Amino acid sequence: MTEPALPQAPEGISSRAIGWIAVAVVAISAGLVAIAWLLVVPVPAARPAGAPSPLERGAIDVASGGEQIRAAGARELERAAWLDRSAGIVRIPIDLAIEAVVADPRLIGTPPAGLAQAPEAPR
């Protein structure tokens, strides 16, 4: 026995509607490509190519790049000065500090007056 064929519904979208949708997609894509091209293509320059850019002479070119600040810091490191005269704290150049510690190692490692000495480790 053969079973009867089931009824089939006709197509819901016409071929004309599919064609119009395809045309709309192509038109929209072409419009977006045109907009992207306009955004990417550089605008022709009004000044000659050899002329300096107005952006090249700005605050960066005028500034010293920190050279003045570095030089002032180096001058401070090269001279001795009191940091706290009442506490006896002095800032001296590192070379002078190294020579002083080599000459008298007791200059470093001494605890402040209020701290007790740490006990020696058992042997």
Image (cartoon, helix red, strand yellow):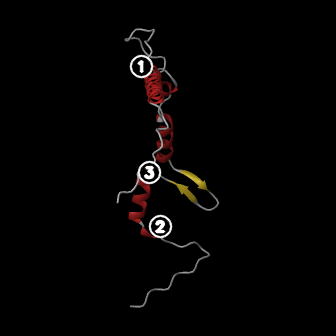
Q: Position of residue 58 (x, y in %)?
A: 51, 23
Label 1 is placed on what type of residue? Val
* Residue that badge 1 annotates: 41
Give the residue drawn at x 43%, y 28%.
Answer: 22
| Crowdedness near tag 1: few (<14), some (14–19) or many (≥20) residues, C-alpha within 10 Å | few
Label 3 amino acid? Answer: Leu
Task: Indicate the secondary structure of the residue bearing disc 1.
Answer: loop
Residue at label 3? 6
Toward the viewer: 80 or 45? 45
Q: Observer-nearest residue: 13 or 48? A: 13
- Residue tagged 2: 107
Foreground residue, 17 or 106?
17
**Residue 109: percent from the left, percent from the top?**
48, 71
Residue 13 point in image, percent of width and height: 48, 35
Q: Nearer the viewer, residue 18 or 12?
A: 12
Q: Is residue 51 above or below residue 95?
A: above
Q: Are marks 1 and 2 in contact (CB under 8 Å)?
A: no
Is residue 77 depicted above or below 31 in this figure? below
Q: Earlier in the sequence, mark 1 or mark 2?
A: 1
Answer with mark 1 or mark 3, whichever residue precedes in sequence.
3
Residue 28 image offset from top left, x and y in percent: 48, 25
Kindly identify the amino acid type of the residue bearing the numbered disc 2.
Leu
